[in-house]
Amino acid sequence: MPTYKAPLRDMRFVLHELLNVGEVASLPGYADATPETIDAVLEEAAKLTENELAPLNRSGDEEGCHFDNGVVRTPKGFREAYTTFIEGGWMGLACDPDHGGQGLPKVVNFVVEEMICSANLSLGTYPGLSQGAYNAINLHGTEELKALYCPKIASGLWSGTMCLTEPHSGTDLGLIRTKAEPGGDGAWRITGNKIFISAGEHDLTENIVHLVLARLPGAPEGTRGISLFLVPKFLAKEDGTVGPRNGAHCARLEHKMGIKASATCEMRFDGAAGWLIGKANKGMSAMFTMMNTARLAVGIQGLGLAEAAYQGARDYANDRLQGRALGGAKFPEKPADPIIVHPDVRRMLLTMRAYNEAARALAYWVGMKIDVAQKHPDATARQEADDFVALMTPIVKSFYTDYGFEAANLGVQIWGGHGYIRENGMEQFVRDARIAQLYEGANGIQALDLVGRKLGQGTGRLLRQFFHPVSAFIEETGADPRMGEFTFPLAKAFAKLQQATAWVAQAGMRDPVEAGAAASDYLKLFALVAFAFMWARMARLALDKTAGEDGEFYKAKLATARFFMTRLLPQHTSVFQAMMAGAAPIMELKAASF
């Protein structure tokens, strides 16, 4: 069975050497977030995830959640682990100190989220949903609602959910039917059904705070008529303690392919008391506060599971004896060589490793930009950072979860038949990874968001936050002969991305179907270039450090960078060619002929 060890050395490399995370300490409110403090936090997070969360991953999957007469019970050990989690202050890691949180940078929270997702994704969904609810209430709620609910959620005593989807309304939220009517007491009465609600009911916290999309009487049709409401499981008393039960109930648990220890519920609201979050009929803007947080968090899920699958496959490849190396025995004293000597096994492991390390670097870069967008004293700097985060959100959500599922499958392949056997733990990663490509906006929707919203926003303003740094890096390193093997492939792929961007913009203006047909390929092309940029930057750092005390670490960086540039980045050519074929090959077949 795989065991998880937090990759602290690589995390520190990205944070301290590549991104210089110490700069966040200069932002208002982050003075205590020194490199030493961050390292200490990560050390403790590693202990928590390795020793408390990871041992429950397989048992939680085996047992799943239990539903009995409206009550949901999590698997054995989950309540104790969650109690340890909140007692350590982990729920409030990045929450406002005014609410009892620790107020640490979002980038630190990203790193801890990766560890949690690697160790026990199902358990991690509970605090993950709470983080999104906290952010929405903190940004859009009234002062009264923030004062009551934010400290409770930040402490982990109360948890949160997002209640968006209905049986007939998934991606198209404009079709929702849940209604809100005046209650006459300052609250609204919420009535309707929601499905696929993660952490909708459970036994980890004393209260659950649902954020529910609903329609006011006479609201405009479509998304222009949606409002967001805070609907607690239990109403709060005047002193802030739990009071009587509200009209919010779990009707049933979904029986799922994966994340079986995460309670996915059908929720019924029967005249439940709720309070408006944000403005009437403006619920979509408040909802996107939750959704954008959730989309980045789901991308981290892809990275976390890919890292866990990589570690499990790497350890097995070093231990499993099968056959001899093609060039002759590498371990003649053993009856066979470990399978890591075989080229195809190494290809799969390097694919996982190369994607993981680039994804980690890009994700933490996004995390730092979130901190700049929220804390920097200069408005222009905040806007530029926010533009970068907005541009990268669909890429992180979509590409990370696509490659995360691929990495989980490669892990099973390396284990062979033993990987397909449940008791060995590798197949769980495949099942758990699959949902991440679907929830918080299916990956095809992320691609449409990228080409339909992000590219044209501000006449390309968002794109400049990525294109300009890449152009500057290529110009700066182009004359360095040591960087040729990294800069030249990046420059070639970046040129294709620029060409593809212009084509999508022009074709999309003529016919939106053309942009839609190109969207998924364009997103993958963008992601490959972004990963190539991160690898070129990491290679540049490693070149001068291979002879030092930690030389083997940097040599491994360079070897993995070369693998990415020569074996993975060339995919950009075929993706580009597929885009250039246009929509016709996709759309010409009549629906009746499928």
Image (spheres, rainbow, N blue to C red):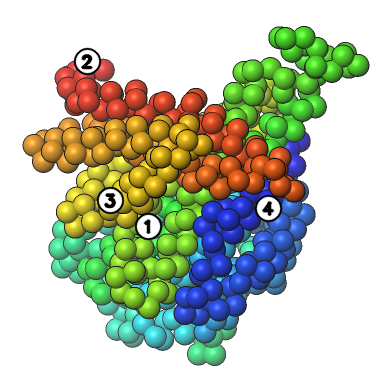
Question: Which residue bears the numbered disc 2?
Answer: 593
Q: Is residue 277 above or below residue 357?
A: below
Quarter of the figure with residue 97 = bottom right
Instruction: Name the amino acid, label 4.
Output: Leu
Q: CA distance from mark 2 to mark 4?
A: 53 Å
CB of mark 2 within 8 Å of CB of mark 4? no
Amino acid type for the residue under numbered disc 2: Ser
Quadrant containing the C terminus is: top left
Disc 2 or 3, which lies upstream in sequence?
Answer: 3
Q: Which residue lies under the disc numbered 1?
A: 389
Residue, disc 4: 8
Q: Cα distance, mark 3 to mark 1?
A: 11 Å
Q: CA distance from mark 1 to mark 4?
A: 24 Å
Q: Which mark is residue 463?
A: 3
Residue 570 or 584: which is nearer the viewer? 570
Give the quadrant of residue 521: top left
The image position of residue 150, as x and y in percent, is 49, 77
User: Which mark's residue is nearer the viewer, 2 or 3?
Assistant: 3
